[in-house]
């Protein structure tokens, strides 16, 4: 890898291959605002990047600073190797990464008019007018001002006027929203992972009792929610929530869950000064909570390699009696 301490001016396109760029690639004159950048593989850029179009032919590629494109960020479908953006990515128009062979990791938020991703991991949230996701993991939320399309996706939550979904999808948080009723293709399934023992699964330990994924009936679990802002403007939303179906959560020791370590470690990314691990039941350490390891874990969940138990809704009367007798005694004292 050849080290570069500066980018030469005067070219309408900068091509990088086998390069370590120690500086930012930012325009200094008005003529450089129309400069395109083409990444051809084995490239690391340590500073921030501005380009009219940023085209990535192949990985591996690491962007350690923030990235902004005036028109398009485009990763070619047949790009191979791991492509990582450590900080926020924004585009005035579109961000497209419909990968067939490789994988892309976005370590922070994505903000663009149109976002289309396949086989990508997003540690933050996505903000766009239109969002299309296929076989992706988004630890934050998908927030679209027009339409959101989901196909085999894990996401924290979502909010969009119009949503269409297909395949098997998972939510990390209890509730998500849409303005219009969600449209689902035949065979579409949704599961909620807010009570799944992801920490134990990441470590390779058995899941704790009374934990697991919750199957969501999009029609039965849909409720009308009215939001009122300070100026008394009312917005009616459809909320998809499992809050009314998690009575068992009151019987769980939620503090023993380690799900938050996975999400926090990935979302903070490069801001963490050291890499942490989780302690297994036998006292040994898990794999490091690095962004690539957390991404690999969630993709195994998404693709069915790691199976999550179904949460049983049945709780014995004796368990309820012990639980509520305890709180009655606490209240009496």
Image (cartoon, helix red, strand yellow):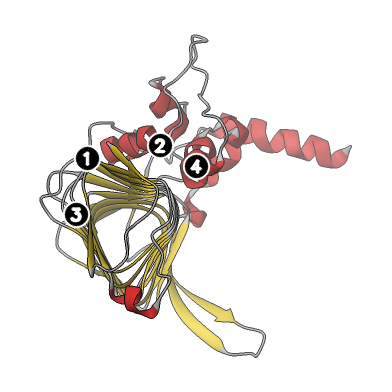
Q: What element carries label 4?
A: helix
Q: Mark 3 points at which residue?
A: 167
Which label number is shown at residue 55?
none
Q: Give whichever of discs 2 and 3 has the lower sequence position.
A: 3
Q: Which circle's residue, 3 or 4, is located before the other in the chain? A: 3
Viewer-nearest of labels 2 and 4?
4
Please identify the quadrant where the N terminus is shown: top left
| Pointer 2 with pointer 3, Cβ within 8 A | no
Please name the residue shown 40% across and 37% down the image.
Answer: 212
Where residue 25 appears, as percent x and y from the top left, is 38, 59
Q: Tag on residue 212? A: 2
Relative to 255, is 76 on the left or the right? left
Q: Quadrant of residue 249?
A: top right
- What residue appears at the point 34 percent right and 57 percent down from the top-left corner? 7
Between tags 1 and 2, which lies in front? Answer: 1
User: Which element carries disc 1, helix, strand or loop?
Assistant: loop
x 89%, y 37%: residue:
333
Q: Distance between the residues labelled 2 and 4?
A: 30 Å
* Residue located beneath label 4 in the image: 270
Residue 85, image x, y percentages? 37, 50
Q: Which of marks 2 and 4 is nearer the N terminus?
A: 2
Of callouts 1 and 3, the N-terminal one: 3
Label 1, on which residue? 303
On the rendered structure, is 246 left or right of 73?
right
Q: Which of 307 and 73 is in front in this view?
A: 73
């Amino acid at each position: 890898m050849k080290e570069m301490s500066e980018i030469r001016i005067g070219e309408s396109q900068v091509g990088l291959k086998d390069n370590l760029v120690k500086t930012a690639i930012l325009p200094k004159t008005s003529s450089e605002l129309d400069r395109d950048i083409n990444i051809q593989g084995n490239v690391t850029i340590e500073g921030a990047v501005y380009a009219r179009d940023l085209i990535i032919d192949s990985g591996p590629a690491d962007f350690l600073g923030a990235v902004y494109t005036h028109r398009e960020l485009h990763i070619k479908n047949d790009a191979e190797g791991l492509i990582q953006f450590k900080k926020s990515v924004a585009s005035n128009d579109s961000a497209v990464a419909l990968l067939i062979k490789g994988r892309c990791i976005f370590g922070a938020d994505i903000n663009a008019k149109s976002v289309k991703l396949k086989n990508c991991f997003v540690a933050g949230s996505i903000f766009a007018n239109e969002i299309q996701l296929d076989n992706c993991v988004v630890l934050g939320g998908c927030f679209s001002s027009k339409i959101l399309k989901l196909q085999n996706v894990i996401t924290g939550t979502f909010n969009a006027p119009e949503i269409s979904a297909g395949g098997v999808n998972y939510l990390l948080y209890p509730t998500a929203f849409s303005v219009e009723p969600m449209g689902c293709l035949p065979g579409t399934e949704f599961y909620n992972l807010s009570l799944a023992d992801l920490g134990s699964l990441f470590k390779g330990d058995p899941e704790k009792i009374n934990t697991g994924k919750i199957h969501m009936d999009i029609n039965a679990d849909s409720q009308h929610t009215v939001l009122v802002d300070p100026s008394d403007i009312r917005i009616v939303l459809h909320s998809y929530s499992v809050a009314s179906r998690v009575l068992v959560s009151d019987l769980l020791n939620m503090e023993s869950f380690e799900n938050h370590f996975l999400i926090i470690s990935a979302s903070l990314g490069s801001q963490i000064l050291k890499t942490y691990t989780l302690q297994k039941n036998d006292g040994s350490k898990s794999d490091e909570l690095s962004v690539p390891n957390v991404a690999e874990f969630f993709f195994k969940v998404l693709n069915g390699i790691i199976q999550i138990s179904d949460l049983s809704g049945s709780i014995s009367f004796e368990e309820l009696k012990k639980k509520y007798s305890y709180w009655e005694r606490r209240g009496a004292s």
